[in-house]
Amino acid sequence: MMSNHIKLMQGNEACVEGAIAAGMRFFAGYPITPSTEIAEISAQRLPRVGGKFIQMEDEIGSMAAVIGASLTGLKAMTATSGPGFSLKQENIGYAAIAEVPCVIINVQRGGPSTGLPTSPAQGDIMQAKWGTHGDHPVIALSPSSVRETFDLTIKAFNYAEKYRVPVIMLMDEVIGHMREKVEIPNREDLEVIDRKKPTSGLVDYKPYRIEDGELVPPMAEYGGEYRFHVTGLVHDETGFPSNTPKVAESLIKRLIKKIDDNKKDIFLYEEYKLEDAEIALISFGSTARSAKSAVDMARAEGIKVGLFRPITIWPFLDTEIEQLAKKVNKIITVEMNLGQYAIEVERKACKYAHVDKYGKLNGELITPDEILKKIKEV
Amino acid sequence: MSSRLINEYLREDKLPHIWCPGCSHGITMRAIVKAIDNLNIEKNNICIVSGIGCSSRAPGYMDFNTLHTTHGRALAFATGIKMANPKLKVIVITGDGDCAAIGGNHLIHAARRNIDITTIVFNNNIYGMTGGQYSPTTPQGERGTTAPFGNIDKNFNLCNLVKAAGATYTGRSTAYHVNMITKLVEEGIKNKGFSFIETLSICPTYYGRKNKKGNVVDMMNYLKNNSINVKAAEKLSDEQLKDKIIVGELYKTQEPEYTEEYKKIIESFQKER
Amino acid sequence: MATSLKIKNEKKLIVKSEWCKGCGICAAFCPKNVLSIENEIVKIVDIDACIKCGQCEMRCPDYAIYLGGKDDE
């Protein structure tokens, strides 16, 4: 048995290591601060494990190449930041409707537009959910440490493969560039999920046929046993386009349902000192680290505060937030934007608790002192 | 019942196709499967990728691995497919708007990499699917619904464009010169690198009507009477070649192919171990 | 050579009229005037003149006319 591997690592590096451990064998990207190291390290690492790296001509092309490679049987990923994330939206929608597993890393920086290229932000919360047009499913995760970036990248691939859905990792500049000690687990201790393949020897193979009681069709690959058609148009189980209202509705509803019905499996979060808390902070990503310190500082002064840290951003942790609201008197959302996650929290919590928000978007981290001040205000 | 070629290579249950009466896309699609038939390539080893537009509907009718992607992006999707499995013969079917306007960047970069993809553009000089807007290949002075007073944009010479960008095989044919399409596609598929075949197509419904080009047969005769083989064209002056369509194998060379070069990098690490 | 000629001669001109869109390309480019368009559908008007050259099949955008061999019937 191999001994555990301990390394000082950057978040962006941990992301690539996690991806390779999850089985990533294709990466297409385009240089953009502050995610570039993910492309650079992928270029270094992938050929060593028989994988492929390509720097595409633009962000749109990177997303397209990732989908092409995934349809050809490889676990595939791309990485970007705000401006590039905007460009990728077109084909993220394609991956959603054609049900192509893929992972999109967004190391968030200040926006809109070119914004603050080297400063952290958490302003892409809503874009991760609604960036591409039309109703569609999406999973988004947000790590708040380097080690968690490693773990969540594996999870991101697992969800992508299991549910045939694009999975977005909402990192931020701080998490991407911060260095921490990471203890890399042994391979055999990692849970790695591969896409389900169709059974061999089918006479009448249909690429989107769903087994009874299932919501995700098994996935063949180009160059394999079956020939099939894939389109971004609304399609029936044969994969061919259809204009029938019934087909359109049942397809989109199933795409949503395959995520909704599996929230238990997808919901990830951390609770910190919430047992007796009267005030709950809700914070994620790098901001949650400051929030955690603020909890300790407030507690030292006798204020009963705890932290709820969403790890899964989308689908929204609706039941968990409702439960939390029932337990505490006040909720303060803390995020590096003007209250994007707060909108969702208010929607679920306002019936039970007072919801306040603290946001900042000047490119500076939110400090524990600022949060403590806010706690004392409410 | 239909001919062996159609029966074997097209998805007959999807026919008749959606293209307008006299649209030449069906002719070109048949010429392509004829090339595949001549080369005797196993159907499962072929992947046909398209973007958006009239021409991009072709893969839906073709009984291979097929992918109908987003507008302009076919070559970027195809690049991912070819990288993931270099054994696949990857063919891109695209239109003039799809590959030269919204997909122009992907086109020149796929050519630059010399990745082994055969791209066939069905160039009908117009956006057909959206109802006749002018495209990057609409000749200057001609009309589209968005060029009601005549197009003032200069049009692209697509074969020159991709050659300059690094393609190792280019050829041009027309919907009249059907056997030539087949021959060029065969050579394009055989070329280990980026191959580009432009087929001038007719769009009687929009381009033809908008520009008073006569009926379907008139448009077909225009292609017949105004084309000149590249060999014959060599002897003529630019003045003599004005408004002529130069057809045939235009360019052929050998350069390292992208996925093979990448394979060498992978292999260098396997040796290391 | 003799065999292939024989097979070629056994081929028969077949119209699949449900796929015909009546564009007229086949009739216009048939070298022997075998075909005509009537009521927007192709009609064989002079089968005896047909030399089975296959131009119509090659040029039909809709796969509505072809030379069928024995296997095709």
Image (cartoon, helix red, strand yellow):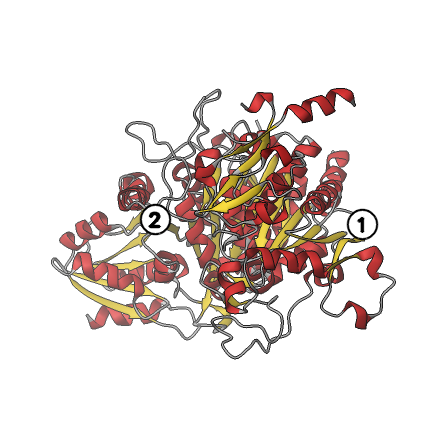
Res A199 → quadrant: top left
Left or right of residue B247, residue B68 in this image: left
Left or right of residue B55, residue A137 in this image: left
Quadrant, the N terminus of chain A: top right
Q: On what subunit does the disc labeled 1 rest? A: B
| Disc sitting over residue B142 in the figure | none
Q: Nearer the viewer, mark 2 or mark 1?
A: 1
- Callout 2 and callout 1 share a chain: no
Residue under label 2, please give it: A137
Foreground residue among A292 and B46: B46
Q: On what subunit does the disc labeled 2 rest? A: A
Residue A9, given in percent of the width and then of the height, sits at: 56, 51
Foreground residue among A314 and B152: B152
Quadrant, the C terminus of chain A: bottom left
Residue under label 1, please give it: B255
Left or right of residue A198, residue C73 in this image: right
Q: Secondary structure at mark 2?
A: loop
Res B177 seen here: yes
In the picture as drawn, the residue positioned furthest to the right comes out as B235
Q: Is residue A199 above or below residue A47?
A: above
Real-space CA distance between mark 2 and mark 1, rounded to the nearest whole angstrom: 43 Å
Residue B54, given in percent of the width and then of the height, sits at: 50, 54
Q: Is residue A364 above or below residue A157?
A: below
Question: Which three-letter amino acid code belongs to the residue tagged 1?
Answer: Glu
Crowding at mark 1 (Cα within 10 Å: few <14, some 14-19, many 20+)? some
Crowding at mark 2 (Cα within 10 Å: few <14, some 14-19, many 20+)? many
Residue name at image x 48 percent, y 65 percent:
B132
Question: Which three-letter amino acid code belongs to the residue tagged 2?
Answer: Pro
In the picture as drawn, the residue positioned furthest to the left comes out as A351
Foreground residue among A287 and A318: A318
Residue A151, given in percent of the width and then of the height, sits at: 45, 43
